[in-house]
Image (spheres, coloured by chain):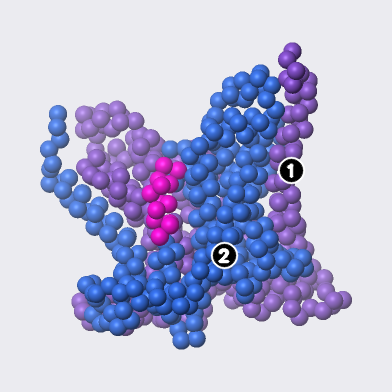
Chain colours: A blue, B purple
């Protein structure tokens, strides 16, 4: 029996589209502003139709955004890869072998992600100053590796738990060592789940503000720090700068939102299966 | 046995060693970047220490003085109360909006949910810093788009971020914008776990809507919603970037949540020992909420 389109269906669809537009409006509006001329940004009434210009992006290049962009990449990629490799093996160990106190350890690791960063950063700052790590790449990579671990460990353990143990047994029967089992048998099974884990952590660091703000010193400027600096300049908010920079900052995120749909719930809840 | 193959005893030995080798790197990281710093914080919370002003040899053990100062000064209670208000209002609004949207978007009538739902999830993926920028554009007193319409339609403007009466709710609304879609997503997933036969049966039996919600849907979606609420509560307690980028705690102390106070004490006034005591309070809250979360997760 084919469902006919009723009035209720139409209303529901219109409502859903309106809601989506309301939620997208803040993003759309700012992206629009990034293509406006200075005059048009400040226009009263606000201009919905305008001649687009790249002036703000030229200005952005002039002020330099390559450094924050490369810093964001230089910090996030190594940290996430390191955390993923470390946690892949740790998760395998937690999943397959009996480790005393493993529940407590898993709990402790998760609470890391739940602890307010502003509280966690105080002792780190004191110790990093002592160790000469403030404002250095190794110091930041160490921090980000640590704070990528909760998600990596919890998600990977969940995913590995779902891989049948018979695979391990078959590998064992073939005389594969434990390490080769993880690399040759488990890793290929993880596939897109591993990619999702990596991507979620990349987004986390791409967006991270507080650790880099306090531990990064003056030199290590990432994208969020550059945006923050654009908000609080001597002359107030530098609208042209923050609008174009924020647009570049959210571009990869919007793509990721589509790619990650399947894993989003799992990633955000640390392992709930839908 | 073919050469190169391992005997069972050798394998057993390898496993019992390797399981520790695999977790070792993580333990080292935990120790250096986490356990030592946390113990350091705990220790410092009992000292009159400032990372700038304390000279070697001046460090003084003060026992619970930092804590008693924290608990006796109404200023810090007020900051804590503000944080609780923030968490409560933000999470409640997100819950109501999120659950309603979840029902809307799970409706069978909706076409193109595949495109609309990912679009709805973008706000929670973007950085709080960027979200702050978005809302600064919208809230701008003179040329901001919201104030323009307010003025045209009702003849007044609101200084969203500059007026102490509205600053907190304005920041909360940005949080609601970011995170309602998360509750929505959880609701959609939860509704997918309800067996369709059950709903059809309810349809045939003409069970009233309220009864359907209470006795058929609710038991299925409750575990998801509990998790969503807990996770949002935990996250809302961490709020920092969003407030920093919109008001920096101002005007006055209108949006100075305890997290902002903690930053000020530690990195503006350099009351390191005192700030450590606040950090320990946060640690206790985190541990309680996280254990509740894990219990709820095991049940789900």
Seen from the viewer's position, the closer of residues B212 and A44 is: A44
Residue at the image point whose x is 25% and y is 77% from the top: A46
The residue sitting at the bottom extreme is A235
Q: Chain of mark 1?
A: B
Residue drawn at (53%, 41%) of the image: A194
Quadrant (top left/top right/bottom left/bottom right) for the C terminus of chain A: top left
Residue B115 position within the rendered picture, expressed as x and y whole percent measured from the top left = 30, 48
* Residue situated in front as seen by the camera: A252 or B140: A252
The residue at 78%/26% (across/down) is B13
Image quadrant assignment for residue B187: top left
Q: Would you say A173 lies left or right of B82 here?
A: right
Circles 1 and 2 on the same subunit: no
At label 1, counting other C-alpha atoms closer than 10 Å, the crowd grade (few under 14, some 14-19, many 20 or more) is: some
The answer to the question of whether label 1 and label 2 lie on touching residues, with beta carbons closer than 8 A, is: no
Label 1 SS = helix
Q: Tell me, for residue A71, which label it has, or none.
A: 2
Report whether residue B225 is seen.
no
Above/below status of B100 relative to B7: below
Q: Which residue is mark 1?
A: B24
Image quadrant assignment for residue B60:
bottom right
Which region is colored magenta? A251-263
Check if residue A261 falls in the magenta segment. Answer: yes
Q: Chain of mark 2?
A: A
């Amino acid at each position: 029996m084919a469902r006919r389109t009723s009035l209720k269906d139409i209303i529901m669809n219109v409502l859903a589209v309106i809601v989506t537009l309301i939620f997208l409006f803040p993003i759309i509006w700012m992206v629009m502003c990034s293509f406006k001329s200075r005059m048009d940004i400040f226009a009263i009434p606000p201009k919905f139709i305008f001649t687009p210009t790249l002036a703000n992006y030229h200005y952005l290049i002039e002020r330099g955004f390559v450094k924050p962009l490369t810093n964001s990449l230089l910090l996030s990629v190594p940290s996430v890869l390191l955390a993923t490799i470390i946690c892949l093996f740790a998760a395998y160990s937690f999943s397959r072998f009996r480790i005393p106190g493993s529940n407590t350890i898993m709990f402790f690791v998760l609470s890391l992600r739940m602890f307010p960063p502003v509280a966690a950063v105080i002792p780190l700052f004191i110790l990093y100053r002592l160790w000469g790590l403030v404002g250095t790449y190794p110091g930041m990579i160490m921090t980000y590796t640590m704070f990528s671990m909760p998600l990596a460990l919890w998600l990977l353990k969940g995913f590995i738990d779902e891989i049948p143990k018979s695979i391990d047994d078959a590998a064992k029967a073939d005389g594969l060592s434990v390490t080769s089992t993880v690399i040759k048998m488990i890793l290929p099974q993880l596939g897109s789940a591993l990619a999702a884990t990596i991507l979620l952590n990349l987004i986390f660091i791409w967006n991270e503000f507080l650790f880099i703000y306090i531990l990064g010193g003056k030199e290590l400027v990432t994208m969020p720090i550059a945006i923050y600096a654009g908000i609080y300049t001597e002359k107030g908010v530098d609208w042209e700068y923050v609008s174009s920079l924020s647009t570049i900052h959210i571009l990869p995120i919007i793509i990721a939102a589509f790619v990650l749909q399947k894993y989003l719930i799992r990633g955000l809840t640390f392992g709930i299966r839908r | 046995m073919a050469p190169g193959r391992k005997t069972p005893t050798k394998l057993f030995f390898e496993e019992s060693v390797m399981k520790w080798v695999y977790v070792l790197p993580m333990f080292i990281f935990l120790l250096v970047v986490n356990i030592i710093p946390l113990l350091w914080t705990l220790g410092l919370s009992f000292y009159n220490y400032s990372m700038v002003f304390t000279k070697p040899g001046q460090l003084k053990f003060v026992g619970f003085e930092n804590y008693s100062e924290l608990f006796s000064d109404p200023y810090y209670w007020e900051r804590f109360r503000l944080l609780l208000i923030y968490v409560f209002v933000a999470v409640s609004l997100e819950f109501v909006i999120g659950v309603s949207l979840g029902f809307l978007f799970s409706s069978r009538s909706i076409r193109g949910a595949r495109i609309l739902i990912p679009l709805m999830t973008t706000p929670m993926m973007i950085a709080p810093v960027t979200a702050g920028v978005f809302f600064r554009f919208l809230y701008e007193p003179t040329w901001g788009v919201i104030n323009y319409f307010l003025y045209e339609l009702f003849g007044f403007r609101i200084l969203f971020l500059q007026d102490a009466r509205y600053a907190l709710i304005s920041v909360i609304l940005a949080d609601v914008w970011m995170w309602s879609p998360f509750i929505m997503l959880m609701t959609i997933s939860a509704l997918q776990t309800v067996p369709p036969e059950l709903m059809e049966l309810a349809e045939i039996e003409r069970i009233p809507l309220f009864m359907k919600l209470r006795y058929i849907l609710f038991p299925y979606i409750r575990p998801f919603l509990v998790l969503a609420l807990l996770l949002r509560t935990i996250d809302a307690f961490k709020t920092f970037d969003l407030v920093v980028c919109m008001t920096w705690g101002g005007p006055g102390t209108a949006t100075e949540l305890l997290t902002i106070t903690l930053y000020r004490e530690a990195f503006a006034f350099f009351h390191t020992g005192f700030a450590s005591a606040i950090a320990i309070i946060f640690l206790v809250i985190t541990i309680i909420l996280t254990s509740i979360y894990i219990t709820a997760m095991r049940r789900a």
